[in-house]
Amino acid sequence: MDEVGRQYVELGEGWRDDLECLFSYISPRFGRVDRQRHAWEYLLGLLSSVERKNGWQLAEAAEHETPYSLQHLLDRAPWDADAVRDDLTEYIAQELGDRNGVLVVDETGFLKKGTHSAGVQRQYSGTAGRIENCQVGVFMAYAGQHGRALMDRELYLPKEWTEDNARRQAAKIPDQIEFKTKPQLAQQMIERAVAAKVPFAWITGDEVYGDNRSLRVWLEQSDLHFVLATRSNSHVWTEQLRQATVETLGKTVTDADWQTLSAGDGTKGPRWYDWVRIPLLSWQMPGERWLMLRRSRSDNKLAYYVSQ
């Protein structure tokens, strides 16, 4: 492995040791020794400085004459990607686990030119910031004091795909895969993390998840703490049994209510924001519910979050 690694990327000793530790969790899933080696080469290739990480470029970096062995690993070799995901989850729980860790759910788009890739259609891509022909994946990352890692993923399949048997068969989509919204996919991944006993304290995500009442209710009923972004026109119930938009509630805050706190370090040091929280009515379970407001100190722009 050391020789192959030098062909790809110069890694610090600690970094390299951690990578080999990770690979020791997943390598048995690939079976034969040659497939394990190809998986290692592919992994290092993704981390390398190779500009275009396609089959030919990665094969050349690994000193293969053709990309066929790497392509065979990805297209036809018998290994279970979900089992590898489960091994990765075990690695994260054991090597990076932190009782104050955070699960982060988000989606990203993969721009496509054709129409045959599973799930591809014209839809909003956060990567591009507009509607594009793309695939959309929902991802879950883990962040804690010992490190950060992508932990789980699900491909979002629009109804136009799940209800079209011909397209499903052509793209080799398993029969048991049904339509699920992005928040439902996020819940599915959170359930797997809980079942795997991954230590964490909070779950966070953007408005796609914060504005989904079903997901929030499930999190509350499961006694899982969360901080989820929500849109300014979202409605909430106050402790005074009054329904209002979060923007309206934000206008009731006085200057004395704000507290300046850091949102963590950025490239230029601490990122300071003004924060305030407003108690909300608890419908589902005992406990505290909050509307949190974050105000930019440069332009006074507000962001809204619901929290338990």
Image (cartoon, helix red, strand yellow):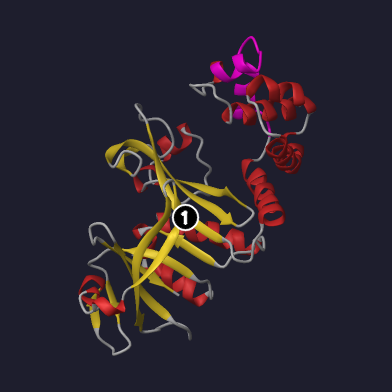
The image quarter in which residue 129 lies: top left
Residue farthest to the bottom? 240
Q: Residue at x 74, y 44 (%)?
A: 25
Q: Position of residue 69 (x, y in %)?
A: 65, 19
Q: Residue at x 29, y 61 (%)?
A: 297
Q: Is residue 67 visible?
A: no
Q: Secondary structure at mark 1?
A: strand
The image quarter in which residue 182 lies: bottom left
How many numbered marks are there? 1
Look at label 1 and name its amino acid.
Val
Q: Nearer the viewer, residue 184 or 132?
A: 132
Asked whether 210 falls inside the magenta stretch, the response is no
Q: Residue at x 60, y 26 (%)?
A: 45
Q: Does 41 appear above or below 300?
A: above
Position of 143 with respect to 92 (left or right) is: left
The magenta segment: 57-78
Residue farthest to the right? 33
Please state, as top left, top right, bottom left or bottom right, where the C terminus lies in the image: bottom left
Q: Does 160 appear above or below 96?
A: above
Position of 189 with respect to 86 (left or right) is: left
Q: What residue would you read off at disc 1? A: 105
Q: Is residue 236 visible?
A: yes
Position of 230 with respect to 165 (left or right) is: left
Q: Position of residue 163 (x, y in %)?
A: 38, 46
Q: Position of residue 298 (x, y in %)?
A: 26, 57
Please state, as top left, top right, bottom left or bottom right, where the N terminus lies in the image: top right
Q: Does 285 appear above or below 185?
A: below
Q: Label 1: how many residues lie within 10 Å, few (<14), some (14-19) or many (20+)?
A: many
Q: Position of residue 139 (x, y in %)?
A: 49, 49
Q: Nearer the viewer, residue 271 or 242?
A: 271
Asked whether 70 falls inside the magenta stretch, the response is yes
Q: Nearer the viewer, residue 180 or 187?
A: 187
